[in-house]
Amino acid sequence: MDKVIRIGTRDSELALWQANTVQQQLADLGYQSELVPVKSTGDLILDKPLYELGITGVFTKTLDIAMINNQVDIAVHSMKDVPTLLPKGIVEAAILPRAQTQDILVHKNFSPSNNNTIIATGSLRRQAQWLHKYPNHTMVDLRGNVNTRMQKLSDSDWQGAIFAKAGLARIGLTPEKTIDLDWMIPAPAQGAMLVVAMENDEFCRKALAKLNDKNTETCVHVERNFLKKLEGGCTAPIGALATIKNGKIYFEGALFSLDGKQKISIIKECAINKAENIGEIYAEELLVKGGKELMKEIKAQMAS
């Protein structure tokens, strides 16, 4: 094990926590490694909503390029940020055990009945689901890493902002005033960490295979296949969550209109040995239920 594995990561506190977690697990197995932090386009351009940047994998692209250019050997990502189609030559090497999947509201005296309520999020999925539940509230865009977003909330007159519960917990930043959004369907693969490697790098792939969690892998692949089938290259308000219990996969997925007024959802269960193509099958069912027309509307609105 003479090779020192170069671990590519974004340089935010959360990204570094994730990379350090992978580094420690590799060390426990006897592998040497070093962290190579980089800034992504998504971290550098904070004055535009993500969907306006027009870049697939805005948080992962810089690390993809670093891997292809042999500047790093592997890269650690929040899996929900990773495009469903990886660049040629890059493969999934490990999916770590999943953390909490819920979204959470960090707030200042939140009152659902207050029509002047302003809630911040940079996610179309969170925005649409919030407006579906609270159509009289106002949504504002919020960009930046977890620490930046938390500071912006503190400095603003907003009533609250939506975060991934796992992200706040991982870096010990969960404030006292929070509400678990149990009704909000998370992003596909939310709470999961993905480590990618070059397809031809047998040493790193073999090392990382020892970190892989099979149950998490099964669930996030169902969710991401559902997303891939629905999206068709378009960013859209899509939520999906698969869980395993007693040998079965339980799945909930939904597509929302951008304004939150329309919701097309699906709740299913199947045997775990039928998991391979089930995400695509569920997406097909949702498309037949009106999802196809709604996706056309979303694409038209995004293009205008």
Image (spheres, helix red, strand yellow):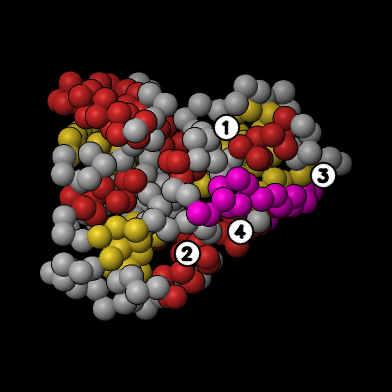
Q: Are marks 3 and 2 in contact (CB under 8 Å)?
A: no
**Mark found first going from the N terminus, 3 or 4:** 3
Residue 50 visible to the viewer? yes
Rate crowding at label 1 as few (under 14), some (14 to 19) or many (20 or more) other CA atoms within 10 Å. Answer: some
Q: Which of marks 1 and 4 is in front?
A: 4
Q: Which of marks 3 and 2 is in front?
A: 2
Secondary structure of residue under mark 3: strand
Front-most of residues 117 and 213: 117
Residue 200 lies, with reference to residue 27, above or below; the image says above
| Residue type indicated by callout 4 | Ser
Return the residue at label 4: 12
Residue 232 lies, with reference to residue 35, above or below; the image says above
Return the residue at label 1: 92
**Mark found first going from the N terminus, 1 or 3:** 3
The Cα atoms of the two marked residues, 1 and 4, are separated by 22 Å
The Cα atoms of the two marked residues, 1 and 3, are separated by 20 Å
Return the residue at label 2: 149
The Cα atoms of the two marked residues, 1 and 2, are separated by 29 Å
